[in-house]
Amino acid sequence: MISGIVLPLSMINSNYKTSSWKSFLLKRIIRIEPPYLLAVLLAVIYVYLRSLMNHTGSVDIGLSFKNILLHIGYLVPFFENVQWLNGAFWTLAIEFQYYILLIILFPLMISKKLFYRVIFYTIMLIPGLLITTKVVFFPLYASLFLIGILYILKKSNNIYMIEYVIMSIITSFIVYHLLGVEHLFVALFALIIVNYFPNFKQKQFYFLGKISYSLYLIHGLTGSVLINVFSHYFTQSYQKPILIILGLTISIFAAYLMYFFIEKPSQKISASIKYK
């Protein structure tokens, strides 16, 4: 939902044109790829090391060259007998599919003619309803993105209130139908925060917001790994909260290092690329 807000808002404010699609894609790749590729490397190392440890559960993730290569292009969902090295990576595939679709559909999204906007809404909503299995593919989650997109279209005066209300209700019902009440609640709750508390700033939250992408990528490869390994040795009830706090601290510290040395430089380079 937040991606549905942030990217269209940036494109509208930057006077994005379809001819600038290469710059847009380059900006996104430079922004998200370096931390992701480092996380893939860490995942490869983790899976390999875990396979050498006899006292842990069996590892059924293959470290084949094909599997690793498919991670680079976010192509794992499109091939059989391969799986993500890290459970967090699948959402990045959804995100990248969103980038591609946004490049193609942006003119329809901001069109002044209702007919073209309806085509945009149809493309975003109908394919997800036609999927009969829970495929990890963009159409299943497109309605979540559309909740944010509709908000930005209204805030930028590209659509009228009546269109915003009607389409938001339809989209919310589709989110509920496809993904359940939990997804809908989180999306709408986040939207309320964005709309009614736009200037809220708090130092600790701001810090976590800065490192959130890095934290998302490697928390399962740092703090969670520490908790999993040491939970075999520290089994007393009073030790478990201490172990969880330690794992959380390690995750945040590792994420900050990734943010400072990898993600922040990538952000600066991405921001320096302007649309023609």
Image (spheres, grey):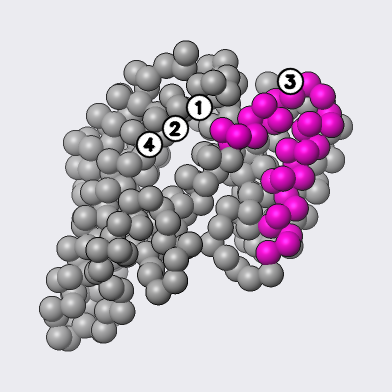
Task: State the image quarter where residue 129 is shown.
Answer: bottom right
In the image: residue 54, left or right of residue 247: left
Which element carries disc 3, helix, strand or loop?
A: loop
In the image: residue 45, left or right of residue 142: left
- For residue 241, above or below residue 215: below
Observer able to see residue 33: yes
- Residue located beneath label 2 in the image: 25
Give the overall secondary structure of the magenta segment: helix
- Residue located beneath label 3 in the image: 157
Q: Earlier in the sequence, mark 3 or mark 2?
A: 2
| Residue at mark 2 to residue at mark 4: CA–CA distance | 6 Å
Measured as percent of width and height from the top left, residue 43 is found at: 25, 61
Q: Earlier in the sequence, mark 3 or mark 4?
A: 4
Marks counted in the figure total 4
Which element carries disc 1, helix, strand or loop?
A: helix
Q: Is residue 109 magenta?
A: yes
Q: Would you say the residues marked 2 and 4 are in contact, meaning their CB atoms lie under 8 Å apart?
A: yes
Amino acid beneath label 3: Asn
Q: Would you say the residues marked 3 and 2 are in contact, meaning their CB atoms lie under 8 Å apart?
A: no
- Region in magenta: 102-131
Task: State the image quarter where residue 54 is shown.
Answer: bottom left
Q: Residue at x 21, y 83 (%)?
A: 56
Label 4: few (<14), some (14–19) or many (≥20) C-alpha neighbours in 10 Å: some
| Residue at mark 1 to residue at mark 2: CA–CA distance | 6 Å
Q: Would you say the residues marked 3 and 4 are in contact, meaning their CB atoms lie under 8 Å apart?
A: no
- Residue located beneath label 1 in the image: 21
Label 3: few (<14), some (14–19) or many (≥20) C-alpha neighbours in 10 Å: few
| Residue at mark 3 to residue at mark 1: CA–CA distance | 23 Å
